[in-house]
């Protein structure tokens, strides 16, 4: 079962289904993608990866995309078929960045969500 999220991007309305819970392969792909993106910043301890970097700097976006795609179970976005790192839209830039920001934020929220443990 996955988590359906509704696209806020006007150019590509629809839903994306994220794996929920994420399996280790998807989680590790996400972690490796973030590590590669941070490495692209030069490994400077002062330099911190931001969502803006990931969305607006194409070289960093390229590192993030495998992690995003690994976390997606299904794509249902109007005008786009099943996306891969190679087919993810780079243009128009504003819409592409909005799509990236949304997906990064949703995946990050999924990973950092508080666990709801029922009373024993």
Image (tube, grey):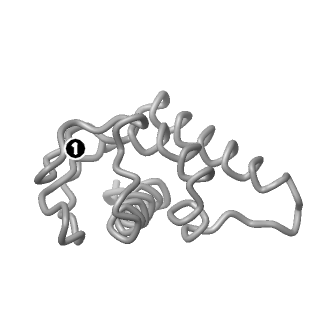
Query: The N terminus appears in which quarter of the rendering?
Result: top left
Query: Would residue 116 be visible to someone looking at this image?
Result: no
Left or right for 104, reference 87: right
Return the x and y of residue 81 as percentages of the image width and height.
18, 39
- Tell whether 16 sits left or right of 25: left
**Point 47% across, 59% down: residue:** 108
Q: Does 72 sit above or below residue 94?
A: above
What residue is drawn where x is 13% and y is 50%?
79
Q: Is residue 106 above or below residue 35?
A: below
In the picture of the structure, the residue carrying the numbered disc 1 is 2
- Residue found at the very far top of the displayed protein: 25
Q: Nearer the viewer, residue 28 or 14?
A: 14
Image coordinates for residue 62, horizontal then vertical, percent: 54, 45
Among the 4 quarters of the image, the one containing residue 36: top right
Question: Where is residue 6, by image quadrant?
Answer: bottom left
Relative vertical location of residue 19 with respect to residue 24 in this rendering, above or below: below
Q: Quadrant of residue 28?
A: top right
| Residue drawn where x is 61% and y is 52% of the image | 60
Q: Nearer the viewer, residue 49 or 57?
A: 57
Image side of residue 85 versus residue 74, left or right: right
- Residue 24 position in % (x across, y down): 49, 31
Q: Count every numbered label the image shows and give the total.
A: 1
Residue at 36% across / 44% down in the picture? 88
Query: Within 10 angstroms of label 1, few (less than 14), some, or many (20 or more) residues?
Result: some
Q: Position of residue 61 (x, y in %)?
A: 54, 52
Q: Residue furthest right?
A: 45
Helix, strand or loop status at disc 1: strand
């Amino acid at each position: 079962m996955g988590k359906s999220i509704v696209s806020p991007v006007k150019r590509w309305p629809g839903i994306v289904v994220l794996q929920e819970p994420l399996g280790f392969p998807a989680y590790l792909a996400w972690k490796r993608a973030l590590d590669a993106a941070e490495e692209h910043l030069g490994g400077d301890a002062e330099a911190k990866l931001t969502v803006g970097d990931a969305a607006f700097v194409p070289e960093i976006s390229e590192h993030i995309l495998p992690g995003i795609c690994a976390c997606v179970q299904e794509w249902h976005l109007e005008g786009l078929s099943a996306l891969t790192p190679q087919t993810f839209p780079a243009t128009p830039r504003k819409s592409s960045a909005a799509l990236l920001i949304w997906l990064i934020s949703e995946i990050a929220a999924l990973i950092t969500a508080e666990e709801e443990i029922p009373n024993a």
